[in-house]
Amino acid sequence: MNRREIEAVIEHSCSRLMKMADPPVKYWLMLYVRGKGESDPDVQLELEQTRRYPPRIKLLKAMREDGTWPISERRKTAEDSGFGPPHGWTYMTMLRNLDWLHYYCATVDDGFIDASLEKMLSWQTEEGYIGGPTVDLIPRPYYNGLTLSLLLKYGRSRRDSRIERLIDWIMRTQRHDGGWNIPYLQDVKYQPEYKHMKTRDFINLVHEGRIPYDPKAFDDIPSCYWSTAGVLTGMVWMLDDPRIANIKRGGSFVLDGFFKKNYHPTFYRSESHWTTLKYPSYSGSGYWALDSLLYLGFGPDDPRTERPIQWLVEARDKDGFWYHKERPDRLSDQWITAMALMILRRYTSMM
């Protein structure tokens, strides 16, 4: 599609959404689709209304002094009977709610957000990664990328030694093809002696130190598209980093795999994840991955972006909105549409 066609899509859908959107959605549309400045009176009005937005107030009010949120008794019992946070629902709830609060224009000075960031950093291991939220104790690059993105979105400095260690761990675990995968589960587990073993039994062997691990021994096994996409959500905040060429290798790996089935059955295997418009978007969706790719500079000059952009435009309903399922949901459909528009605007700005 040419720029004029995409601009027409943006204008039509944005105009319709602006008439009925909640304040935070309007705020983001004004800044990143309409191109208004932060000091614009209309932007300031939506920002003020967003600060009084009930879902924002509710999230901040429910937040505890230690930066966590209450979880259900069932999940708390399961978490406490295991390894405890971050291995369980407490950490996942923090990631989800901090992401929402970011879009609700919260800052590190609101509520106990600063304490929440500190809580996550307190879970950092000696190796540099933050464990969880899975209970198997095997590190997940995906969630470490999400955590890094939140730390940097809320203004934490990359010079913080803990954040430097997190970034260093991520970069150390990058693989030969530019991507990332889940250690042990997406490489060692394919060996004949472990392939048919129950995952729980395999993980027990890992924790007992009975499985030697040299990542370089598995260079013939491709990385995981979605583990890599998760990492990139944090890495897009590091465009001035001297390692940016290696970070972009991860982007190229994801772009090459767009619309393809993931190599690994352990994480979002089906190719349908690329074309499912999910909310929250970090739950693994093509438009979420595309957002990071554009930030990394993969734009109209790269022919590989043409099909994903074409898909995103064609995923729009005839009423001008994007939907994540047949049954409408007012909040999620607003955000999905707004995010699609921000992606398309960024794409046209690169043309």
Image (tube, rainbow, N blue to C red):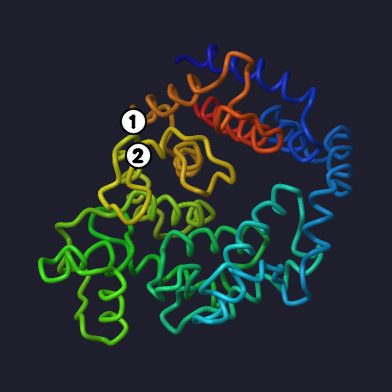
The residue to which callout 2 is attached is 255
Q: Position of residue 199 (x, y in %)?
A: 29, 68
Question: Which of the labelled discs sits on residue 9, or is there none?
Answer: none
6 sits to left or right of 225: right
Against 306, is 285 above or below? below
Quarter holding the N terminus?
top left
In this view, the residue farthest toward the front is 74
Residue at 81% x, 62% y is: 110
Mark pair 2, 1: CA separation: 7 Å
Residue at 27% x, 55% y is: 223
Q: Are marks 2 and 1 in contact (CB under 8 Å)?
A: yes
Against 3, is 126 above or below? below
Secondary structure category for the residue under label 2: helix
Residue at 85% x, 48% y is: 54
Residue at 83% x, 44% y is: 50
95 sits to left or right of 171: right
Question: Which of the labelled discs sits on residue 304, or is there none?
Answer: 1
Secondary structure category for the residue under label 1: helix
Against 87, is 252 above or below? above
User: Which of the 4 image quadrants contains residue 138?
Assistant: bottom left
Q: Position of residue 350 (x, y in %)?
A: 51, 29
Q: Position of residue 184 (x, y in %)?
A: 27, 69
Amino acid beneath label 1: Arg
Q: Position of residue 291 (x, y in %)?
A: 51, 40
Neighbor class of circle 1 (other Cα within 10 Å; few <14, some 14-19, many 20+) is some
